[in-house]
């Protein structure tokens, strides 16, 4: 008998023995209705009637899109994006090749056709191997949540610049807790949770919050967003729709993006 077959037989035998020896472990209740209410909830402890979480099929490999994600960039086309153009330049699609898209300087921000409020976002980005400048001119781009709240994308590898403008910063507000940047040309990964701000008419009733994991490292933990992205001044809030397109910033230098997906959430 082959070793694997012997092992399977032993495991099957063990499982059968466990079922025989421990009948109390099987045909167990799947919930209760005689338990106390959980504080501040409408459900009882282990409530049998509590709705079960929806089943989501995870990706086959880490970083891949789960089954309920909107895949915004799979490397095959730019069908989820529009390109705004800027400073009276004509709009120009970003370059798509080898599974990534790259900023076309002056082509304008890449803006999703889909709108988002609360969301989970995954994206990967890579700085130019050839430095495009110093400080804020070195592979600057950005994740513009709702088109206005910027999570900075920047080549922060041996590139001195102000702390609240480094990669992983909430631009102009919070530096990343640490700098886990990879070398230019290597792929960096952002996994982000965003709670959209809420407005009542023109009044802000709840600010936005953002959490960012950068190359597997927590760099922002539910930070309160203070207002829209601004340079050398404090950004403020202006009321807007509950869902807005996501944008990636054209800062006039080439930066690459790949594997972008989002999950719509409701906190
Ligand atoms: Mg930027």
Image (tube, helix red, strand yellow):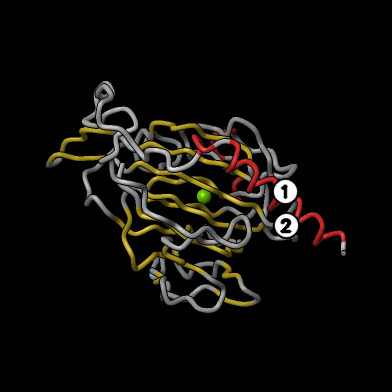
Question: Is 100 on the left or on the right of 33, as rendered?
Answer: right
Residue nearer the viewer, 160 or 36: 36
State the image coordinates of residue 201 (x, y, percent, origin top left): 12, 42
Residue at 62% of width from left, 73% of height from top? 99
Image height of 147 relative to 37, above or below: below
Q: Name the spot of residue 183 as percent of width and height, x first.
A: 75, 51
Q: Is residue 229 left or right of residue 243?
A: right
Count of number-bearing discs: 2
Quarter of the figure with the N terminus:
bottom right
Viewer-side residue, 231 vs 218 = 218
Q: Which residue is mark 1?
A: 182
Q: Which mark is on residue 186?
A: 2
Residue in front for this viewpoint, 27 or 79? 27
Please state the horizontal and vertical placement of residue 163, each as a whole percent of the image.
59, 33
The picture places residue 23, in percent across and down from the top left corner, at 52, 38
Q: Residue at x 69, y 45 (%)?
A: 14
The C terminus lies in quadrant: top left
Where disc 1 sits, the SS reads loop
Residue 259 occupies which quadrant of the picture?
bottom right
Q: Are marks 1 and 2 in contact (CB under 8 Å)?
A: yes
């Amino acid at each position: 008998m082959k070793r694997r077959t012997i092992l399977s037989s032993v495991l099957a035998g063990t499982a059968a023995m466990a079922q025989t020896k421990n009948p109390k472990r099987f045909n167990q209740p799947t919930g209760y209705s005689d338990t106390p209410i959980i504080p501040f909830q409408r459900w009882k402890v282990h409530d049998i009637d509590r709705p079960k979480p929806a089943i989501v099929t995870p990706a086959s490999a880490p970083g891949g899109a789960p089954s309920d994600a909107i895949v915004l960039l799979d490397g095959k086309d730019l069908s989820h994006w529009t390109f705004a153009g800027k400073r009276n330049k004509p709009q120009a699609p970003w370059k798509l090749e080898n599974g990534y898209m790259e900023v076309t300087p002056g082509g304008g921000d890449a803006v999703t056709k889909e709108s988002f409020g609360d969301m989970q976002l995954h994206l990967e980005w890579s700085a130019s191997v050839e430095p495009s400048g110093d400080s804020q001119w070195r592979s600057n781009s950005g994740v513009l949540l709702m088109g206005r709240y910027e999570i900075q994308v920047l080549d922060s590898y041996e590139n001195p610049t102000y702390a609240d403008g480094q990669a992983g910063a909430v631009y102009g507000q919070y530096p990343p807790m640490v700098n886990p940047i990879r070398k230019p040309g290597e792929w960096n990964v952002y996994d982000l949770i965003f709670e959209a701000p809420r407005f009542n008419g023109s009044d802000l009733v709840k600010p936005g919050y953002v959490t960012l994991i950068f190359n597997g490292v927590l760099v922002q933990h539910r930070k309160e967003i203070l207002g829209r992205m601004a340079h050398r001044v404090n950004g403020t809030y202006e009321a807007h729709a509950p869902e807005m397109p996501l944008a990636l910033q054209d800062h006039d230098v080439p930066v690459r993006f790949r594997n972008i997906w989002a999950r719509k959430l409701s906190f």
